[in-house]
Image (cartoon, coloured by chain):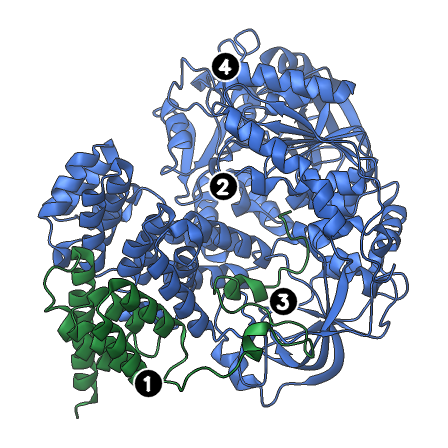
Amino acid sequence: MDYTVLYDDDHLRVVHRRGSSHFTLATFPGLGVWARARHMWAEGPVEKLDLEAVGFVCKRGNWYPMESVERAAPAVRRVLRPVSVGYGYSMGGYGVLKHGRRVGLSHVVSLSPQISIDPADVPQDTRFHSAFDSAKHAGMRVVAEDLPPWALMVYDPAFDGDRMQADLVAGIPGLARFRYPHLNHATLGMLAGTATLGSFIDLVVQGDMEAVHAFLRAQRRQSGHWFHHLARANARRGRWERADKLWERARALGMSAAVIRQDRAALLQAGAASEPPAAAPERAARRPSPLNARILAAARKGEHDAAIDAARELSPEAAEPHAVLAALEAALALGADEAIGAAARLAIGADMPKGMRAACALRLARAGHGGLAIQSLLADPKVLEEDAGQPAVLFALRVIASPAAGDAAARATAQHLLRRLLNAVPEERLPSPFAFAGGSVAGLAVPLGPEVVLHVAPGVPAARIAGVRRALSALPSELELAPPPRVWMLEDVFVNRLGQVWNAEGGLLRPQRLPLPKASFAAMTRAPMVEDAVLAPDAEGKARGWLAEALPALAWRLDGEGADLPLVLREEPAADVAGIMALAAAGAPPGLLSAGDALRVRRLHFGEVALRQLGHHAAFRGLIARLTARTGGGGAGGAVCLASRAPDGGREPPWRGLLAEFGFRLLLPEDLPLATLLAEVNSAEAILAEPGAPLGLLALAASGRRVFEMIEPSGGVIGRLGPAHLSRIRGHEHHLWLAGPDAAGGPAIAALRAAIGEFLAS
Amino acid sequence: MGDRTAVASEVGDILDLVPHAGPAPERGAPAPAASRAPAAAPARSPAAMAERAVADGTAETVRETATRLIRMEIAPGARIASARVFARAGRGEEALAVLLADPATFGSPVAAVVLDHVVQIQGLPRPVAALAWHLRRRLREEARRRKAAAAP
């Protein structure tokens, strides 16, 4: 079905699709989603349901400028059917509310909308201030006169930014509200899926607000997205057991296992109960005792001394977990040893769920108080019980066992406790009869790509710049020392769906950070057996990482070595893995084996490839050539921006405005099939990578890519130079932007603009 | 992509944290020098090691011995016995470090015999004393709970 362009200018395009529905659906995409569609936002459901539709497509984050919409409105009105439903999210939620009546819509549904981004209207919601343009956005605030006869707004009242926005239209007649707590800005996911959206729109068309509300309420029971966010909310508060149960439910309802794994890992990394305790809505119902309340109130106001004073008066038996964590954070913020000791004693004595105990230990360990961390963690023997909270405890132990935690004795205790808990044993690996192409020639004679160009934002400390320069220049000597990649083999081992590998005695060779599940132990005696198999490396559950990080290690198998050997996957074989194998294999793609609880393998072969070993081009030449040839023509070319994962709340990074200025097309890697992503990278003339974008793709991209990578100021930059090194090894041109402490400030944006300009001109 | 590209194998992850462990070399490779060294002096029992360290009297010797005991694979009873030696000698921190390094002893009701001694040591750092006291309290509560559950 063809799409007709009704209107097009520098800011806005409006397309029309003829369909068989008796009503028109008009879609208004949000900032992060407008670039995904070929023609219009939500074209998938629109086409499957064969809806008559109009798509408003903002060409950049411009909040549907009045002037453009007014010019487009006559053409839109001409094609709208008498019943026409507007549907918008975030920036699109604004568009549909502000312009619904103007363009002739009869019904509008606005998900997590902004009511205005004018700093004068929303001084405290700073998320989108940088996109406000007084010339384009004069009088932008939504008022009663803008609304069509039937209007509904859906949002999370506990999410500060969206609540402030909703408060601006409090009391406006004719605007119904539906509240979805726990979702933050991610209300869109509640209506994901063609069938769900279709049923919802049908109810909206009937104009039955009560039925629409009932539908949205019922979605809570049926949506994996809902349970996923509920689990996240629980995990943030340290309730890992409950969170894991909710994640199970989310998975059963179709939520992506990879997304769950990734979010769970991120929350675990961030530390359980990272959300300010006072923000937990349940607290209102469970009123804390006066001393606990004093700690919480003082911590909330940043009055650390007062929080510690109250903590000193509080007996551990009366301490509530959130107050303990608040006291600990206050003490760590103060940095006084005596205060930290007092808070740690509270943590030791208070009875807490193990997730919260692990969170306390994590805070202490990360601040270099390893001794207090292990004392806080091990003060309750229940922490070692095997249950859903165990991963949080194991993670805390890992941090205490790391050098960052500081205390040598605590490190030793944590290291050995961890090893014994996991029953970890050393691998006894043998050389596999299979090998990477190019043989085992040591040393390198590969020309490196051009040197990395460093761009530095204002305010970056000189020591950090010097450190980065040193690390960048260290590469050639490291490469010279890199041995060629090898294929290894483990004899008579078991593998399970978690990717754990263990021996017949139950000793874990690859624990994957967890003890061996009882089910796997029990399944050993009846485990199916294969003679030879290839272990598919795991990339920590990151779907995008799989292509970049696991595929090089399989290059030997995909080149045709061990042609009959199946691939053992840690999870159920995912469709995209099969697709990638078909793209990457020289002959028939390898069969995929699901390990289940236990799979016995007589000879388990696996390749190992470290970053610096990618310089052995002969080992990967065939794989890269096949991928390049088979994904050729799949990309749209031009300049692309690989977006980072959208943070909670949909807060747009401050530099996004520059993308349109320089003509970058935004790609959301998480939403693209891996082959498409690789095709886009291979066809792009320039690639701008936001912090956290999956630049591991560069390992498999055709040489000669031009990359501008942004690195955020926080944390250790040196460890994140992998993509820059990778570019040199693989012959790409790499520019590195070292962001400063104020990434959103005018000078930083100006410097970034200059750096991108220099990159594009180079 | 981090420093290591492929194979998110964790063989190193846990074992790398343990100074003396780590992935074993290829099978059949020459043994490391240490393991080819002449046999060490006759092994002492863990409790005897602890007693000898305590008798030596220097803090450094006690710490070193405690670290060795933390690393050693010893039976739970032997671990508890050596921890008790440290506790009775007033070395509460070392006693706890040895006790807590093995899930078989940390959390065992028998650990209370070590904790009984630790809580009586004067001058312990307050968090260490708090750990011993609360761990003992929780072990006792758990023992009472189990006893009640087992009662007809």
Query: Do pointers 1 and 4 mark residues of a single chain?
Result: no
**Is residue A251 shown above or below A681?**
below
Seen from the viewer's position, the closer of residues A356 and A162 is A356
Image spot of residue A81 (x, y percent): 67, 29
Tell me the kind of residue under disc 3: Glu
Image spot of residue A189 (x, y percent): 54, 45
**Image depth: mark 1 or mark 3 in front:** 1
Would residue A84 be seen by someone viewing this image from the given angle?
no
Query: Dot 3: what SS?
Result: loop
- Residue most toward the top? A135
Seen from the viewer's position, the closer of residues B20 and A590 is B20
Sequence-wise, the earlier of marks 2 and 4 is: 4
Query: Residue under circle 2?
Result: A187
Rendered image quadrant of residue B147: bottom left
**Is residue A443 shown above or below A751?**
below
Chain designation of label 3: A
Give the spatial CA distance, label 1 vs label 4. 80 Å
Q: Residues within 10 Å of mark 2 (few under 14, many from 20)?
A: many
Rendered image quadrant of residue A105: top right
Image spot of residue A581 (x, y percent): 80, 60
Q: Colour of chain B?
A: green
Tell me the kind of residue under disc 1: Ser
Query: Residue under circle 3?
Result: A571
Query: Dot 2: what SS?
Result: helix
Seen from the viewer's position, the closer of residues A651 and A618 is A618
Tell me the kind of residue under disc 4: Met
Query: Residue under circle 4?
Result: A140
Query: Residue under circle 1?
Result: B45
Sequence-wise, the earlier of marks 4 and 3 is: 4
